[in-house]
Image (cartoon, rainbow, N blue to C red):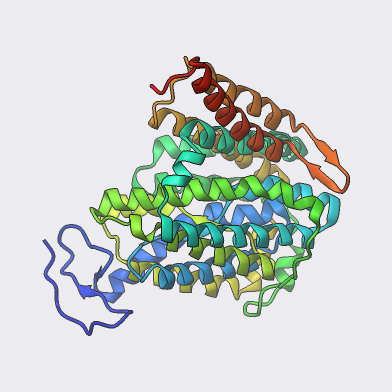
Amino acid sequence: MTTPKTRSGGFLSWRLSDGGGVIGPDERLSWPRTVGIGLQHVVAMFGATFLVPVLTGFPPATTLFFSGIGTLLFLVITGNRLPSYLGSSFAIIAPVLAATASHGQSAALGGIVVIGVLLIVIGAVAHVAGIGWIEILMPPVVTGTIVALIGLNLAPTAKTNYEQDAITATVVLVALIASIVLFRGLLGRLAIVVSVIVGYLFALVRDKVDTSAIADAAWVGLPDFHAPSFEVSVIPMFLPVVLVLLVENIGHVKSVSTMTGVDYDKRVGRALAADGLATVLAGSGGGSATTTYAENIGVMAATKVYSTAAYWIAGIAAILLGLSPKVGAVIASVPPGVLGGVTTALYGLVGILGVHIWVTNRVDFSRPVNQFTAAIPLVIGIADFTWVIGDLDFGGIALGAGAALVIYHSMTVIGRWRGTVTDR
C-alpha cells in the first residue's frame, strides 16, 4: 500500500509514496530515491543506446543527447502518465549502413526523418481510429518475420567486425554469456555493458584501442550536429523500420499496461506520435531513430517503481551525458573486436525476438500461409536480395518486409475465396 501525500495538481506533480508496494506512474518516492531509480534507467538503456551510433558511425554524444530529449518529449506528449524511455533502435542499423555506403551519412539521416514523419502520421490515425487496423495489417506471423529478417540481415556486418580481432571478440562473447548466468538482478540484465567493458579493457591491454581522441575531447561542450539530406533511392530501405517501431511501441505499451494494471490503449496513438517526433528531431540533428526500451521495462518489473518522475531524471541525465564530448569520445573508441563480439549476439537476438513474437502469439506453422509468409521473406532478408528500379534500390529488408505482407494477405484473400484457407 502507498500512503499518498498531496502535492499541487500540476502537470509535473506526483503523489509522494512511502515506498511500500507498487509505485504508480503518478506517484514518486523521495527525490533522492527517485534520482537513484532514474540513474538505474540510464545504466539500463546505456549499453544498447551507445552501441547503435558506434555501429552506424553516428556521433555517440549526439545520439545520447537526442535520446534524452526524446524521452522528455514522450513524457509530455503522453500526459506524463506513460513511463517509458526512448533509446536507439537497432532496427535502423542495416538501412543506415546501406544508405551511408551509397549516399553518405546525411542521406541516412534523411531516411530516419522519413521514418519519424510516417510514425507521427500513423500515431495520429491510431489516436482517432484505434490500433485494430494495425493488427489486421500486420498479424504476428508478419511482424515476427519482419523483425527476424532485420536482425539476421546484419549477420555479415557482425562477421566483418569479428574477423578484425577474433580474440577480443571471443572474450566479449564469453564475458556476455558468463555475466548472464553468474549475476543476478540489475547486474545480470546489464550483461551487455559488462561484456563491452571487459572486452574494451582486454583490447586496451593488447594495445588495440585508439585513445588519442579521448585526451583531446573537452569535458563539456555541444555534441556534433549533422543535417539530413533526402535521396529518393534510399527511402525504401527505411520503410520496413516503421513496421518494427510500430510493433515495439505497441508491445511495450501493452507490457506497461499489464504491469501497472492501467489501460493505456487510448495513449498508444500518442506514444507512436511521440516516438515519431523524437525520431524526426534526432534525424534532423545527427542522432539515431528512437524506440521504447525493453531494458527499462525490465527495470520497472524488478523495482515495481513505475513513476514517470524517474524517467524525467533519466532523460535529463542522458542530455547531460550528451553534452560531454569526453564521454562521446570514449564510446567512439570502442574497437571493432569488441563490436564483433557483442553484435554477434545482439543481431542474433533481434532475429530471436521475431521468433518470440511467433511463439507468444502461437503462430501455427502447420498452415502453409504461415509457412510461406515466413520462409520466403527470411531467405530474401538473410541473403540480402536487391532489386534496382531506376533510381530506387530495394534491399533485402525492404523486399523481405514487402514480401511478408504481400504473401500473407494475397494467400489469405485468395485462399478464403477458394476455400483452401480457413481462419483457425
Please say if 382 is above or below 213. Answer: above
Give coordinates of residue 275: x percent, y percent. Answer: 51, 61
The residue located at (39%, 26%) in the rendering is: 362
Q: Is residue 279 left or right of residue 381?
A: left
Q: Is residue 352 left or right of residue 285?
A: left
Give coordinates of residue 118: x percent, y percent. Answer: 60, 58
Q: Residue furthest bottom?
A: 8
Residue 335 appears in the figure: no
Please say if 90 is above or below 352. Answer: below
Give coordinates of residue 131: x percent, y percent. Answer: 42, 50
The residue located at (55%, 46%) in the rendering is: 244
Q: In the picture, which quadrant includes the N terminus?
A: bottom left
Q: In the picture, which quadrant includes the C terminus?
A: top left
Residue 391 appears in the figure: yes
Which of the two residues, 333 or 396, is positioned nearer the viewer here?
A: 396
Residue 349: which quarter of the image? top right
